[in-house]
Amino acid sequence: MKKILLSGLVTMLLGASLVADNVSSYEYASFKSVNDVKSALHDNGLKVIGEYDVMGDPSYHVIAYTCPTLTNDASKEDRAFAAVQKVLVNSSDNELVLTNPEYFLHAFMQDDFKEEHAKKVNAKLANAFGTLKGSQDGLDDDDIAGYHFMMGMPYYEDMIEVAKGDNLVQKLEKNAADNIAFKIQAGKATLYGIAMPTEKGEKYYVPEIKGQKHTAFLPYMVMIEGDEAKILHPKYYLAISYPNLSMGNFMSISGTPGDIEEYMAGLFK
């Protein structure tokens, strides 16, 4: 009898581990124009804070938005990356591609993640854009916070310090100038979205991995908190943004993480 009970318990535990919910990294919605997207966000309590053309291509236009739910959660130390979500107006494929708050908030909030807050934002998106269809890209919900591409690769907390010292905001705003897609305050941190229109930037690495459809994760973000400027490690951020990325795809842009770090650090010189 004891063996039967033990066997039953093991089966239950294994079964529970096999039914973890898969969370899509992106959601698709019916196409709307840029102006209609901004109106729909505004009408549902979501504030547009910036926009830009990914790769300099107007066919892939990203609109960044926030709301008090996002900024309040992101006000904790090292959590400012969670203050913004994005919508890609993909006129090449006539669809909208949205970063899924349940996915990216879980990744960026880590142990501070509140599922009910993410669902609250997602409900606003569903009201704004109608039926949302999850992408095939995604991770099991219990794998998101501890995600890394493979052994030896960085986690969320392995951020890169690209600058340290005084006047970081002034230096970045002077040097990045028109390449600043958005700026937002979250607690004691200032978060920027920065376009990278260089030869080794978005227009190189996105097409190289055929990632145009899921460029809603861009622009790349820089967080200034205290006397430090940090970015998410590119080997983490690219991987979490493209969870179905193969090793071959990753190796085809092996120089990109260093290029991104160099570019962002150069904005503080």
Image: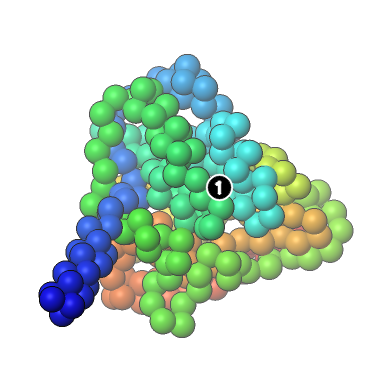
Q: Position of residue 165 (x, y in %)?
A: 84, 63
Instruction: Identify the residue position indicated by label 1 in the image.
Output: 82
**Looking at the image, residue 201 lies above or below residue 131:** below
Q: Residue furthest front?
A: 1
Please tell me how crowded label 1 is: few (under 14), some (14-19), or many (20+) other residues with Cα within 10 Å: many
Name the residue at 44% across, 44% down.
115
Name the residue at 63% across, 49% down.
80
Seen in the image, is 81 located left or right of residue 92? right
Q: Position of residue 215 (x, y in %)?
A: 39, 49
How many marks the image carries: the answer is: 1
**Looking at the image, residue 182 lies above or below residue 103:** above
Determine which quarter of the picture holds residue 184. Answer: top right
Seen in the image, is 197 located left or right of residue 4? right
Is residue 210 visible to us here? no
Name the residue at 46% across, 82% down.
152
Is residue 135 visible to us here? yes
The colour scheme of the drawn protein is: rainbow
Q: Amino acid at mark 1?
A: Ala
Q: Which quadrant would the C terminus be assigned to in this image?
A: bottom right
Pick the residue in front: 165 or 260. Answer: 165
Seen in the image, is 114 located left or right of residue 182? left
Q: Position of residue 189 (x, y in %)?
A: 72, 49
Q: Which element type, helix, strand or loop, lies under badge 1? A: helix
Seen in the image, is 57 located left or right of residue 95? right
Q: Residue furthest right?
A: 166
Q: Position of residue 30 (x, y in %)?
A: 26, 28
Name the residue at 54% across, 73% down.
258
Pick the residue in front: 262 or 63. Answer: 63
Q: Which quadrant would the N terminus be assigned to in this image?
A: bottom left
Pick the residue in front: 209 or 120. Answer: 120
Determine which quarter of the picture holds residue 149. Answer: bottom left
